[in-house]
Image (tube, rainbow, N blue to C red):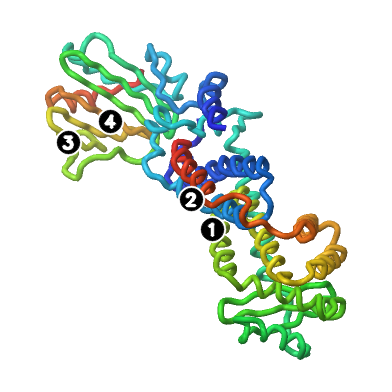
């Protein structure tokens, strides 16, 4: 019985790949729309310290379609784009980023966090870049 | 993939109760079949566990996150629910349809009959019947009521301390005094040894799982086992053929389309003719070990 259940767990995604919620690792931004059904929002502002290319592109299909892009060079930047669902968890001390609508940000040790609402999407930014770069990242988010 | 609501705490819990009770039901059924488990206490215990344990294993926290489902779970049922069928439908659509049907079935078979109780009257209750009921232990305040139905119907209702014995005109007319006494003893047995409270507690558990077909089945089996237990108590120290004959008469007067009722009556007759229930068929420690193993394993299925 237990072996049969395990066989289902392993076997079903082999025949029906989209039955898995994720994570799925992608190699190109071109694949994101096909897998999650929306265009990824990517910051045009990317300092050279992040590296030339993103270190990982990952998507989840459930509970909400989600895209995560990470740069890892001398500095670190992660942008998570989720369609729908509740607002990402944030501490009560978080506050709006000046001149950026529907935003809240906070510091957690050496890292800064920013949560944005853009149409039907929640965007979470996590980085160890200087705090002034949060606004630049928010302002230059564009659909790929 | 399945919609996000399947991952919400309540929906996920309700589905996992069905999933765990289905797995447990298959295991217990195969076990009972293999050891040819007869009616008796072990069978009632297995059915009780089947109703109660999934509520516990499905409530174990920290298992609904994707991290657990993808990396730790033995089976993520979300993958199975997401299997595509025809015309855009997936397996989870079938599960939803079955759940809605079960809720409708519960309303039709259990709630509507409760609202359409037959009219009863305390007038014209035969003296001998009232005396017989009141002479039974714990029934000194029992109310005997009559229904005008011409079917053979003897049932019990009420609550502890306020029990009621319901007898139809058909039963009074067609059963002999000895047969009626045996049937009344059967009804009285429902109020003995904590059977009333256990049955009603499990009924509440069953109502909470009104969408769960396994719970519906296991509660019906449990009720049948209680009837068999009460039969055994009614004929204790007496000739079981008396009750067997009575049950056969009720069987013959039951509508042929009422397959479930006729099947239950036939089973009760078979058990009576077979020498009654067997309470030592499966040791309780063995059942306890099996249940503990399932308690540990099932939370890894989400």
Tag 3 residue: A106
Name above or below for residue B24 compared with residue A65. below
Closer to the chain start, of discs 3 and 4, is 3
Q: Residues within 10 Å of mark 3 (few under 14, many from 20)?
A: many
Chain identifier of the residue bearing label 4 in the image: A
Chain on which label 3 sits: A
Q: CA distance from mark 2 to mark 1?
A: 9 Å
| Placement of B301 over or under B204, stated as above or below | above
* SS under mark 1: helix
Residue A39 in sight in this render: yes
Labels 2 and 1: the sequence-earlier one? 2
- Please report contact status of discs 2 and 1: CB closer than 8 Å, yes or no: yes
**Could you classify mark 4 by the number of other residues whose Cα lies within 10 Å: few (under 14), some (14-19), or many (20 or more)?**
many
Q: Which residue lies at the image location 56% right of the left edge and 77% below the top edge? A: B160
Bin the neighbour count of mark 1 within 10 Å (Cα to Cα): few under 14, some 14-19, many 20 and up: some
Give the quadrant of residue B276.
Answer: bottom right
Q: Are marks 1 and 3 on the same chain?
A: no
- Secondary element at tag 2: helix
Residue B229: x and y in percent read: 67, 63
Name which residue lies at 75% across and 57% down.
B271
Judging from the image, mark 1 belongs to the subunit labelled B
Q: Answer yes or no: do the residues labelled 4 and 1 have beta carbons within 8 Å?
A: no
B117 or A34, nearer to the observer:
B117
Q: Which mark is residue B55?
A: 2
Residue placed under numbered mark 1 in the picture: B205
Which numbered circle lies on residue A124?
Answer: 4
Identify the chain of the residue marked 2, using the numbered disc in the image: B
Q: B117 or B250, which is in the foreground?
A: B250
Distance of label 1 from label 3 (alpha carbons)? 47 Å
């Amino acid at each position: 019985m237990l072996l049969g259940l395990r066989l289902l767990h392993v076997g079903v995604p082999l025949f029906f790949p989209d039955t898995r919620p994720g994570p799925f690792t992608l190699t190109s931004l071109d694949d994101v729309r096909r897998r999650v059904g929306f265009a990824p929002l990517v910051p045009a502002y990317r300092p050279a310290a992040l590296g030339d290319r993103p270190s990982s592109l990952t998507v989840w299909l459930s509970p909400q379609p989600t895209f995560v892009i990470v740069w890892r060079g001398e500095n670190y930047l992660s942008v998570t784009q989720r369609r729908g669902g509740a607002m990402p968890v944030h501490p009560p001390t978080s506050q709006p980023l000046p001149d950026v609508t529907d935003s809240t940000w906070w510091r957690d040790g050496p890292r800064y966090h920013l949560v944005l609402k853009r149409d039907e999407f929640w965007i979470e930014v996590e980085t160890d870049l200087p705090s002034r770069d949060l606004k630049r990242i928010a302002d230059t988010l564009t659909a790929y | 993939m399945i919609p996000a609501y399947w991952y919400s705490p309540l929906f996920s819990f309700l589905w996992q109760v069905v999933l765990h009770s289905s797995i447990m039901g298959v295991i217990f059924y195969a076990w009972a079949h293999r050891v040819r488990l007869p009616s008796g206490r072990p069978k009632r215990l297995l059915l009780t566990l089947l109703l109660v344990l999934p509520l516990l294993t499905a409530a174990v926290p920290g298992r609904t996150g994707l991290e657990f489902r993808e990396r730790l779970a033995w089976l993520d049922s979300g993958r199975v629910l997401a299997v595509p069928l025809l015309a855009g439908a997936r397996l989870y659509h079938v599960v939803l349809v079955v759940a809605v049907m079960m809720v409708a079935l519960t309303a039709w078979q259990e709630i509507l009959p409760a609202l359409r109780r037959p009219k009863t009257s305390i007038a014209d209750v035969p003296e001998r019947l009232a005396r017989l009921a009141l002479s039974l232990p714990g029934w000194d305040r029992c109310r005997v009521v009559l229904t005008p139905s011409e079917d053979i119907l003897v049932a019990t209702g009420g609550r502890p301390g306020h029990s009621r014995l319901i007898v139809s005109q058909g039963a009074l007319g067609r059963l002999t005094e000895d047969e009626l006494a045996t049937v009344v003893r059967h009804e009285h047995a429902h109020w003995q040894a904590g059977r009333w409270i256990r049955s009603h507690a499990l009924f509440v558990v069953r109502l909470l799982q009104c969408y769960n077909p396994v719970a519906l089945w296991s509660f019906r089996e449990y009720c049948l086992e209680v009837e068999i237990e009460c039969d055994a108590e009614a004929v204790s120290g007496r000739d079981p053929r008396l009750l067997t004959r009575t049950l056969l008469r009720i069987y013959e007067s039951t509508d042929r389309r009422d397959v479930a009722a006729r099947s239950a009556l036939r089973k009760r007759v078979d058990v009576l003719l077979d020498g009654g229930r067997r309470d030592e068929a499966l040791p309780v420690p063995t059942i306890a070990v099996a249940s503990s193993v399932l308690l540990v394993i099932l939370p890894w299925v989400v």
